[in-house]
Image (spheres, rainbow, N blue to C red):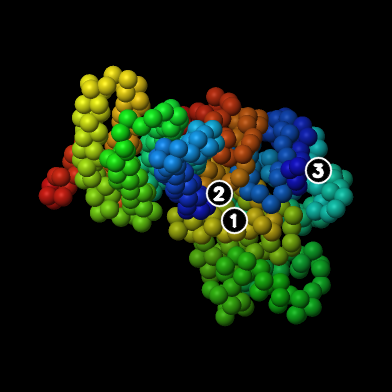
Amino acid sequence: MIDIVLRTENLTASYDEHVVVKNVSLSIVRNSITAIMGPSGCGKTTLIRCFNRMHELSPKARVEGKVYLIENSYKREEIDIYSIDPMLVRRKIGMVFQRPNPFPTMTIYENVIAGYILNGIKLKKSEADEIVEETLKKVSLWDEVKDRLNKKGTFLSGGQQQRLCIARALAMKPDIILLDEPTSALDPVATMRIEELIEQLKDTVTIVIVTHNVGQAGRISDYVAFMYLGELIEYGPTDIVFTRPSHEKTEEFLAGKIG
Amino acid sequence: MFYEKLNKLKEKIIEQGNLVESMIEKSIRGLLNKDRQLLLEVIQVDEPRSNENEIEIDEMCVNLIARFQPEARDLRTVIMILKMNNDLERIGDMAENIADSALFLIERPQVKPLIDLPKMAEETIRMLKDSIDAFIKNDSNLAKNVCERDDIVDAYRDQILRELITYMISDPTTIERAIHIERISRNLERIADLATNIGEDVVYIVEGKVIKHGRYKEAEGGA
């Protein structure tokens, strides 16, 4: 029995009259890495922005259909994320963006616990210290920054900044972390370190990563979804999709003929 | 993730190598000890298992190439494992052929005492074992050594054939049994050929050099 953490049902997203995501139904497996790949403009970023209710923050944005988060509890209760407080959704489903964006006015320390600060959640100093150290260790940043936690996050390298952003999302102990092309602004070595980190993290959190880089999707994902012109064309285990895709469009994308 | 999967692939091909090696050894032992059960085990249990392994290894190789686009030595390793997989499955088939002929022979009087055939089998099994060891240890010298020993096995085959011909001429009732003995020696000779293929594949993985079709002599000369 496959353990699902998030499920969409006929999800459609649009900006005004322009439909960007068309009728997508898919189930994300818990503690796995799912890559959403496809050419630019296929709707993959809009899709994940529907998962954590960021899409509705855009002007004239509309969402139809359902998105269910399944709790990591014995009952595996399904929660319609559009029926609860969006701030709560964004704590359970964190996001990391393409360009590393540590909050420029905050220190490294404050960036890690920014989720608590911005949500008005009070932490004791000892609790905060523990969260900061534990989370920075999880993203393999602790040794590099432990002596300068009170420095601004913007003084770090691109790769370090991105790991800090992942730490910021992780600190809230989410069920899922969404990564929107997290390495496209990074050099190859920094990219490799982020990919290694993502592989390590899947034991503790479910990862959904949007990428236009076929190689990256192949390297790190357990499951892959291929989108084209807003539609979900194919979804399945990466081993199967990459070796014997069912759809011609998937085949063309993997061969570099489209996108 | 790539090296984890590559290591699993290497473990699987070594497992397949050990399986087919044991199939040859069991087939010969079954012949010498007239052990019908052992021979049936090779045919009914081991050979189907080696076929399943071949399919699984093929899929693993294709997955690795599709998902990780390995380059240089990693690419050579995956491609050569694909080739070795094919050769090892063929060796498994030949071991089954040996067991099949052995089943025929153990029910009938011996044409002659089996002296050269066990020696030929021993050398063949050693060649196969060394080719697999060369792969495990990335030992291209051992691999080249395997290629050089093919002539020894060929000589055994010629000797066995010459002797069998004299028996068949002098007593035609031995022909059918002699053909089965010759079939066993022919399969052993083919197994030795395939072991040299594996040796050549190992040299390609380790050194990137092609020593097929006798080129190993040029490689030794530093050409």
Q: Tell me residue B162's x, y (percent).
A: 20, 30
Q: Quadrant of residue A124?
A: bottom right
Residue sitting at x 66%, y 49%: A32
Q: Which residue is mark 2?
A: A220
Q: Quadrant of residue A212?
A: top right
Look at the numbered disc 1 and give the secondary structure of its residue: helix
Mark 2 to mark 3 CA distance (whole Å): 25 Å
Badge 1: few (under 14), some or many (20 or more) residues near its Cα, within 10 Å? many
Mark linked to residue A198: 1
Q: Tell me residue B22's x, y (percent).
A: 44, 44
Q: Quadrant of residue A240?
A: top right
| Chain at tag 3 | A
**Disc 1 residue type (three-letter):** Ile
| Chain at tag 1 | A
Label 2 vs label 3, nearer the camera: 2
On the same chain, marks 2 and 3? The answer is yes
Q: Is residue B64 left or right of residue B91?
A: right
**N-terminal-most mark, 2 or 3:** 3
**N-terminal-most mark, 3 or 1:** 3
On the same chain, marks 1 and 2? The answer is yes
Mark 1 vs 2: CB contact within 8 A: yes
Q: Tell me residue A184's x, y (percent).
A: 51, 50
Residue sitting at x 76%, y 67%: A116
Mark 3 to mark 1 CA distance (whole Å): 24 Å
Q: Which residue is mark 3?
A: A68
> In the displayed image of the protein, which residue is found farthest to the top?
B172
Q: Is residue B208 left or right of residue B30?
A: left
Q: Is residue B17 left or right of residue A136?
A: left
| Chain at tag 2 | A
**Disc 3 residue type (three-letter):** Tyr
